[in-house]
Image (cartoon, rainbow, N blue to C red):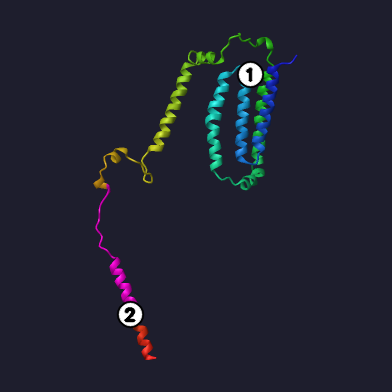
Amino acid sequence: MFDVTLSLFYAFAAILVFAAVRVITARNPVHAVLYLVLSFFSAAAIWLLLRAEFLALTLVLVYVGAVMVLFLFVVMMIDFDLEKIRQGFWANLRVAAPVGGLIVFEMSAVLIRSFNVPESSVASLPPKYDNTKMLGKLIYTDYVYAFEIAALILLLAIVAAIALTLRRRKDTKAQRPGDQVRVRAADRVRLVSVAPVVKAAAAEQAADAAGQADSAVAQGKGA
């Protein structure tokens, strides 16, 4: 029997794997970022099939709509020296290979354990189950203190970033809107009368020309 959901899952999974491979094999950094955006969209589609609407919307709005757009602009604005980056590939392989193997081992351990869960222990969802609603209830009831602590930490991080940016330094300049509004024309514009120097310069040039002419006539008489 043909299952539409299962077919869509395999289709999006194939697109996700292809886009992930192209992220690390594309020679152009801009193309790599665009393939990463495609992989995020494919993962969001898979989460929608799994009825995890909140995670799918968060992935699209936060990562694709903000983070990846920022990455794309940064990559397009910075002139990367690809030849210099490729030269250090084999030098970093000694560290990258063990780290990559450890990551593959950890992911394999988690996935193999999740695949061995018996189907009887997985609770079936009701027909009108709302993932976003249940997640909101869980956050604001059982994990409300952890949620508030996380919000407080993020608030402190925002305040610290603003304080570091707006601190007074010798080499920084800042505008003062209050002083700009109170400024008067007399404080900014000053009329200065300057004596004309055009005629004097023309007279000097005429005198120089007359002197050169006299010297030429004197040289002619002497000859």
Quadrant of residue 40 in the image? Answer: top right
Pick the quarter of the image with the N terminus.
Answer: top right
Is 208 one of the magenta-colored residues?
Answer: yes
Residue visible at 33% across and 73% down in the picture: 205
Under circle 2, the secondary element is: helix
Q: Residues within 10 Å of mark 1 (few under 14, many from 20)?
A: some
From which residue to which does the magenta span run?
188-209
Quadrant in which the C terminus appears: bottom left
Mark seen at residue 49? 1
> What numbered label is drawn on residue 147?
none
Position of 76 relative to 106 (above/below): below
Q: Residue under circle 2? A: 211
Identified at 71% across, 20% down, the residue is 7
Using the image as rendered, state which of residue 94 and residue 175 is in the foreground: 175
Mark 2–mark 1 contact, CB under 8 Å? no
Examine the rendered structure and indicate whether residue 61 appears above or below residue 209.
above
